[in-house]
Image (spheres, rainbow, N blue to C red):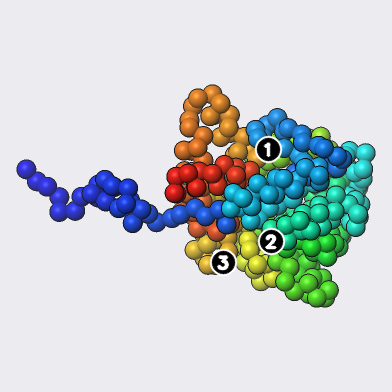
């Protein structure tokens, strides 16, 4: 009988040898926890399509931040939930120094200065039409005028104390414009995480419910500025532009359906590359687990390793605390 000289299963037999040859590891310090912020007092609102994800008022959010730190997660991303009557066509509240996000940044930094805070730079939570920027008479999102507003928004959030501004709008030239205004105001240490390859995806639905922009957007779409799901070379060009304009990190969004994009970007640029495990991906995982079709914990870890194999550094995921717990319990 023939026996192979090399038996790959030999190294899989024992736990210690499996660890010795494990190629990728998960690290809580590279997990980013998105948190929805709502105005008011003693608010903790469920989000139907996103189990275990809630909207928190400022008095409640500090406990959430403490839980993240105790879990080994040291970076959060803040997303505002704005009351409909406060929205307008120009997203004016995005530039309010006493607005929800500037207050949240200061509130959290005062208690947890060691916690890294990312703030989204886009107008869709604030606009009455639900688009990420200013619109003309036809409803088309106008680029340069929008970039001017995003500059001011990024400056406000940086001056409020956030560590990373994350333009998610997909306007042309916005990274260079934001970098310029930060430099002009001596905010040389504020980092830019660019949503460089953000696709016009169906996987954003639960997020839009969470921030209340779905109703505002209605039957409109974002295809004139977000990317077509068929394209990868376009994504590479977008990333190249953002790096040249001064981004410190680049992002692919959504995550799991675009692993090939992530890998291509990482292989080509050897640059800090992030993925956003978006709301639709998270909701599908929970729905399948609820129906008994898969094991939530096992599937979640597989997905995170898929991101790592593709070349991801940081990972934004609503399952951040679940992942941290699994890493600790299973020595992953």
Q: What x and y, as percent, mark residue 36?
A: 75, 44
Given residues 55 and 128, the one toward you in this image is 55
Secondary element at tag 2: loop
Residue density around tag 3, few if under 14, some if 14–19, many if 20 or more, within 10 Å: some
Task: Determine the residue positioned at 91% across, 54% down.
Answer: 98
| Mark positioned earlier in the residue sequence (1 or 3) | 1
Q: Nearer the viewer, mark 1 or mark 3?
A: 1
Task: Determine the residue positioned at 46% across, 54% down.
Answer: 25
Mark 1 touches mark 3? (CB < 8 Å): no
Give the CA separation, mark 1 to mark 2: 23 Å
Q: Does residue 205 appear anywhere in the picture?
A: no
Residue sitting at the far left? 1
Q: What x and y, as percent, mark residue 295?
A: 48, 32
Residue 53 got which mark?
1
Task: Determine the residue positioned at 72% across, 57% down.
Answer: 112
Secondary element at tag 3: loop
Q: In the shown orientation, is residue 201 left or right of residue 39?
A: left
Task: Determine the residue positioned at 52% across, 55% down.
Answer: 27
Mark 1 touches mark 2? (CB < 8 Å): no
Q: Which residue is mark 3?
A: 271
Given residues 61 and 215, the one toward you in this image is 61
Quarter-wise, where is residue 189 in the image? Answer: bottom right
């Amino acid at each position: 009988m023939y026996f192979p000289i090399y038996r790959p299963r030999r190294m899989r037999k024992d736990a210690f040898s499996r660890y010795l040859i494990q190629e990728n590891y998960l690290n809580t310090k590279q997990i980013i926890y998105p948190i929805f912020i709502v105005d008011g007092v003693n608010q903790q609102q469920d989000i139907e399509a996103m189990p275990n994800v809630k909207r928190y008022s400022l008095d409640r959010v500090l406990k959430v931040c403490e839980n993240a730190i105790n879990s080994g997660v040291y970076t959060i991303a803040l997303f505002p939930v704005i009351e409909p009557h406060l929205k307008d066509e120009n997203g004016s509240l995005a530039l309010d120094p006493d607005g929800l996000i500037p207050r949240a940044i200061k509130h959290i930094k005062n208690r947890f200065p060691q916690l890294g805070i990312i703030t989204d730079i886009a107008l869709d939570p604030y606009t009455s039409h639900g688009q990420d920027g200013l619109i003309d008479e036809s409803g088309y999102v106008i680029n340069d005028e929008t970039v001017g507003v995003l500059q001011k928004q990024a400056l406000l959030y940086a001056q409020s104390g956030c560590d990373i501004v994350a333009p998610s709008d997909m306007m042309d030239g916005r990274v260079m414009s934001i970098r310029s205004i930060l430099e002009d105001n001596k905010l040389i240490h504020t980092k830019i995480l660019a949503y460089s390859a953000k696709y016009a995806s169906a996987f954003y639905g639960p997020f839009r419910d969470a921030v209340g922009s779905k109703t505002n957007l209605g039957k409109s779409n974002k295809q004139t500025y977000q990317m077509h799901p068929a394209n990868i070379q376009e994504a590479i060009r977008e990333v190249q532009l953002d790096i040249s304009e001064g981004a410190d990190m680049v992002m692919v969004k959504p995550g799991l359906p675009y692993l090939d994009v992530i890998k291509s970007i990482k292989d080509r640029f050897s640059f800090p590359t992030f993925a956003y495990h978006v709301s639709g991906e998270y909701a599908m995982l929970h729905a399948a687990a609820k129906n008994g079709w898969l094991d939530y914990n096992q599937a979640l870890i597989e997905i995170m390793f898929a991101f790592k194999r593709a070349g991801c550094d940081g990972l934004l995921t609503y399952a951040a605390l679940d992942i941290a717990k699994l890493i600790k319990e299973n020595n992953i």
